[in-house]
Image (cartoon, rainbow, N blue to C red):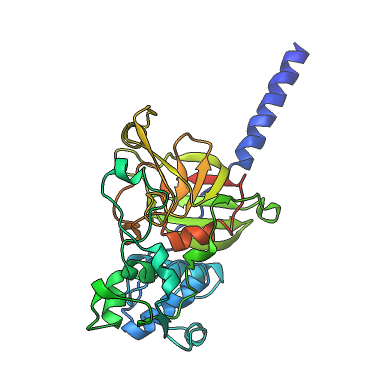
Amino acid sequence: MKFAFLILALGVLKIAAFAQEQPTPPPRVYPVALPNYDEETATRLQIFLDNSDFGPGKIDGKMGEFFRKALISYKHARAMPKTGAVDQWMLDQVPVTYTTYTIKDEDLKFVGDVPSSHAEQARLKWLPYTSLLEFVAERFHSAESYIQKLNPGRNWEHLQPGDVLKVPNVLPFEVERFTEGKVPENPAFGSRKIFIDTYEHLLEVFDQDQLVCVFPITPGSKTLPAPVGTWKILAATIWPWFRYDEGMLNYGVRTENYYNLPPGPNNLVGILWMGLNKPGIGIHGTNNPETIGRAASHGCIRLANWDAARVKDLVSVGNTVLIF
């Protein structure tokens, strides 16, 4: 009887310890009213936040949802008053709002035709950008329409090497620097935790109680929502091949009717796949950053490629992922 009681007591202790180990969602801090800043101020603040790993979404000089959330999150993480007052020291970090980018000959190898059929895509070795506008917009974390606004009168169908474009002065996503392969475990970030807020559409990384970064996401859909619960990152790959299986994507059931799509910025999972210990579910990039936070995904956590590229350097394989 004493032995049985001891086993029961140990079991209760284990359950209690397990419960204590489970991460709890951070408090929401976003319902703060902000004014509408002018385009120049908004762009500078978007650049500052983006360079600080508090992703405002695509840079467009507008007071959008994710810009507001990024600004409030940054202030919360730094224990700053969460007001709409413009902090001059933030603007001082971006003394030059715009810079220029000159189209290079080597940029052309990242641009080409992408067939609409998955069967035809599977015959390729790379899924490139479909235009130099798309290439430049993603490089500078921007809406294509904003790049066009900054460069009026351009013939976007006939950009060529030597053309100079005005772009936001943000740290660029340099697609040419990334090579296909596995992302190694980073022991220095072993204790970090990733929180996926499916209501606010945000990915947050914490190191103990310190908020490290925030990025906008698309977390699943009504049909296949991101799986609520506590998971782990099993592996991470740069420029992944993607197994396009409609059975898995639409119903969560793996079938033998699939296409193996090659890597590239127009692969459906973009630059990164971080697989969780939930079959078919991962944190990944996208071929369409304009839809982040708006269009649905198939149960996965989707980021803009420029954000996904940074997430891989801020977390580690083995990290806990809480989806709530």
Q: Residue at x 26, y 44 (%)?
A: 117
Q: Quadrant of residue 65?
A: bottom left
Residue 166 in the figure: left or right of residue 48: left
Res 224 seen here? yes
**Residue farthest along the top direction in this orientation:** 1
Outermost residue toward the right in this view: 2
Residue 256: x and y, percent? 37, 27
Rendered position, 190 above or below 22: below
Count of number-bearing discs: 0
Q: Residue 274: horizontal and vertical position, in percent?
A: 51, 47
- Is residue 254 rendered to the left or right of residue 318? left
Q: Quadrant of the N terminus?
A: top right
Depth check, front residue: 294 or 14: 294
Q: Is residue 267 above or below residue 134?
A: above
State the residue at coordinates (31%, 48%): 296
Whether residue 32 is visible to the viewer of this picture, yes or no, is no
Q: Can you say whether 291 is above or below 234 in the image?
A: below
Q: Nearer the viewer, residue 86 or 225?
A: 225
* Quadrant holding the C terminus: top left
Q: Percent x, y for residue 185?
A: 65, 49
Q: Nearer the viewer, residue 40 or 268?
A: 268
